[in-house]
Every structure is written in structure tokens, then in C-alpha cells.
Image (cartoon, rainbow, N blue to C red):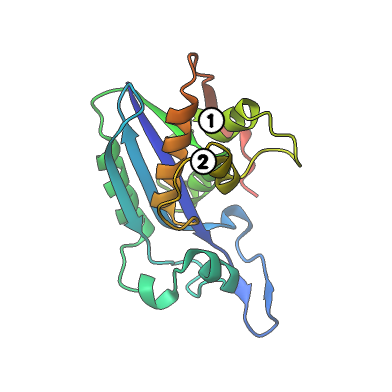
Amino acid sequence: MSYIVLDLEFNQAYDFEKNKTILLIPSCRFEIIQIGAVKLDDNFNIIDKINLYIRPNLYKDIHPYVEKITGLSSQFLQDKPLFKDAYINFKNFIGQECEHIFCVWGNGDLKALYRNLSYYDMLKSDLIMKYIDVQTLATKYLKYSKGGCIGLKTAIELLDLPIKEDFHNALNDAIYTADIFKKICPTTLPLKVFNSKNVRKK
């Protein structure tokens, strides 16, 4: 058994002439531009990590808000691998030696991953993944009730965990999620199953 803490950063379409977000490809609204992940042992310690930047192919110009919060620019990403090659590297990082449980902050990243894989016709069958929603765990653990589920930075602060790096970087956020998971250290793991049959493509 291995735990893979996964976080993604996305880009989306933007009309620079009209200065507004637009919807060009409904089946893949959010294009992945960074994959960050860490692998945990049975005691929730980080034993490996991977950071993959991805050259945008669907929306080549980075949305201004995305660039602002992530610091990722079109120029920085222009020589990075495309999604297909990056995902192969991610699959190699995961490995095939044992069963994996993904740990994510909400399930939005899993939906975006499915839609990107589906767009590039990289799925031979439905995408089925066992996962733990660390955001839900943190929300319940901290008895947080201000407007729904707790945000990553707020959880880090309330748990008195050190802030070492910027947020909205996929690898950094994956590490923060792993830190929260270890701090909470649930005695029972509330496993969920992501099944792409239940995700609308549009």
C-alpha cells in the first residue's frame, strides 16, 4: 500500500482583447500545467516527490489570474513537456508495485485529471481511483464551519504547521496536504472511490 498525495495547477481560456474568461473546450475547461505529488509511507512520512511543469497546448496563453497566483508564465512553460509525456513520468513515479491510495484536497483535481486524460484519449477504460479527501478530514477535525470546506492555507495556520513555501504551487500544496494528513493522523481512513462514469464530460 502506498499513499500518493496529488495536487494540480490549471490554466483556462481567456480573451485578452475583451479581458474576460471564456469557455472554448467544454469537455476540458481546465488544462493541467503542473503536477505535484509526494509518496508517503505507512506512517505518512514523505519518501519521494515529483514536480512536473507542463507546456499548455489547448490554451497557450496563461490566464492572468492563473499567472498571478501561481507565478507560471507562458514563457516559463514554453520548453516544458506536453501533458502526455508529463503524465507518463507521473505514472512511472507512482509505480506498479502495489496498490495506491490518492490523497487530495477535495476531488476537483481528480475530475480535471480525468477530463485531461479523456481529451487526449489516454484512457482505455473508466478511470477508477481510491482516494482520501484530506480537505474533508481537516474540515471535520478542526470543526470548521465558516462557509463550507476549509482552505489549505487556513488549515495549515489553524494546525500551527510551518509555512515554508508559497501556496498555489502543485508540489508545495501536495507537501502541505501531506503535512496536514500526518498531523490529523486518522485512525481510520475514510476511503472514497472516484469513478469517471459519474463525471460529466461537459
184 versus 179 height, above or below: above
200 horizontally vs 45: left or right: right
Q: Residue furthest bottom?
A: 17
Pick the front one: 194 or 40? 40
Query: In x, y percent, where is residue 163?
Result: 45, 50
User: Which residue is pictured at 44% across the width and 56% down the height?
Assistant: 169
The answer, for residue 85, to whether it is visible in the render is yes
Marking on residue 7 = none
User: Which residue is pictured at 28% across the width and 23% down the height?
Assistant: 98
Query: In x, y percent, where is residue 179?
Result: 43, 37
Query: In x, y percent, where is residue 194?
Result: 53, 30
| Whether label 2 touches label 1, CB < 8 Å | yes
Sequence-earlier tag: 2 or 1: 2
Q: Secondary structure at mark 2?
A: helix
User: Which residue is pictured at 41% across the width and 51% down the height?
Assistant: 172
Number of callouts in the render? 2
60 horizontally vs 108: left or right: left
Q: Residue furthest top?
A: 188
Q: Secondary structure at mark 1?
A: strand
The answer, for residue 130, to whether it is visible in the render is no
Q: Amino acid at mark 1?
A: Phe
Query: Mark 1 — residue?
Result: 194
User: Which residue is pictured at 42% across the width and 29% down the height?
Assistant: 182
Query: In x, y percent, where is residue 79?
Result: 30, 72
Query: Mark 2 — residue?
Result: 110
Pick the front one: 133 or 195? 133
69 versus 41 height, above or below: below
70 horizontally vs 79: left or right: right
Q: Amino acid at mark 2?
A: Leu
Are there few (<14), some (14-19), or many (20+) residues within 10 Å of tag 2?
many
Pick the front one: 193 or 124? 193
